[in-house]
């Protein structure tokens, strides 16, 4: 059985509003008009930051698989980590501030960055392998790899 994934571009017609009580509990939805004119409703929990961040008129990308449409999100900034902020830049009044990262912290950040890069490469290779022979553009492959990386990193 061949699995098919389609990428679509759309515009938010209606952002998330009030929560509706459904058989699945309280839910919110966003209505998106695809480039072909089709309207799609995306449902989520009332606290879903991904859906509540979408505003009327905003462009977005959707992925359609056998289960339906899913929003493709860009990488969200991670919550602040335990590592201190680098302060070797400007402090706003033109004065340089001293660097506060120790050598151990720099090595830890470098190691974590290398792990993320290797995992992103693994996601890219998996998408290439799973969709070999499919008519996907390089941009589609990258988008799917990034989506897989983000979803797996949650």
Image (tube, rainbow, N blue to C red):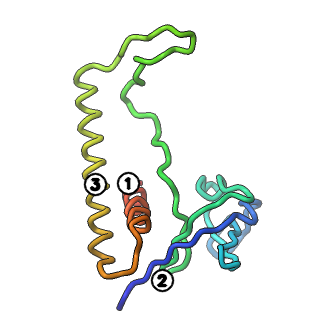
Name the residue beneath numbered marker 3.
Answer: 119
Q: Earlier in the sequence, mark 3 or mark 1?
A: 3
Res. 153 mark = 1
153 to 40, vertically: above or below: above
Quick one: SS at disc 1? helix
Q: Is residue 137 in view? A: yes
Q: Earlier in the sequence, mark 2 or mark 3?
A: 2
Mark 3–mark 1 Cα distance, whole angstroms, equals 9 Å
Number of callouts in the render? 3
Task: Give the residue displayed 25% in from the left and 43% down from the top.
Answer: 114
71 to 54, vertically: above or below: below
**In the picture, which quadrant includes the C terminus?**
bottom left
Name the residue beneath numbered marker 2.
Answer: 66
Res. 130 mark = none
Task: Give the residue displayed 65% in from the left and 52% down from the top.
Answer: 53
Mark 2–mark 3 Cα distance, whole angstroms, equals 26 Å
Quick one: SS at disc 2? loop
Q: Quadrant of residue 61?
A: bottom right
Closer to us: 113 or 36: 36
Are the residues at dot 3 and dot 1 in contact (C-beta closer than 8 Å)? yes
Q: Earlier in the sequence, mark 2 or mark 1?
A: 2
Image coordinates of residue 98 in percent, x first then y, are: 38, 11
Image coordinates of residue 127 in percent, x first then y, are: 32, 69
Image coordinates of residue 52 in percent, x first then y, are: 66, 55
């Amino acid at each position: 059985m061949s699995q098919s994934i389609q990428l679509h571009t759309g515009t938010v017609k209606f952002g998330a509003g009030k929560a509706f009580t459904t058989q699945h509990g309280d839910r919110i939805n966003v209505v998106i008009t695809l480039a072909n004119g089709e309207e799609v409703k995306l449902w989520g929990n009332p606290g879903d930051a991904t859906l509540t961040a979408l505003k009327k008129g905003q462009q977005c990308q959707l992925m359609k698989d056998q289960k339906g449409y899913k929003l493709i999100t860009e990488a969200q900034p991670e919550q602040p980590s335990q590592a201190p902020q680098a302060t070797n830049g400007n402090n706003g009044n033109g004065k340089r501030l001293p660097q506060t990262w120790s050598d151990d912290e720099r090595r830890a950040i470098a190691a974590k960055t290398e792990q993320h890069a290797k995992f992103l490469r693994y996601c890219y290779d998996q998408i290439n392998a799973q969709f070999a022979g499919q008519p996907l553009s390089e941009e589609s492959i990258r988008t799917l790899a990034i989506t897989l990386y983000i979803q797996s990193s949650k």
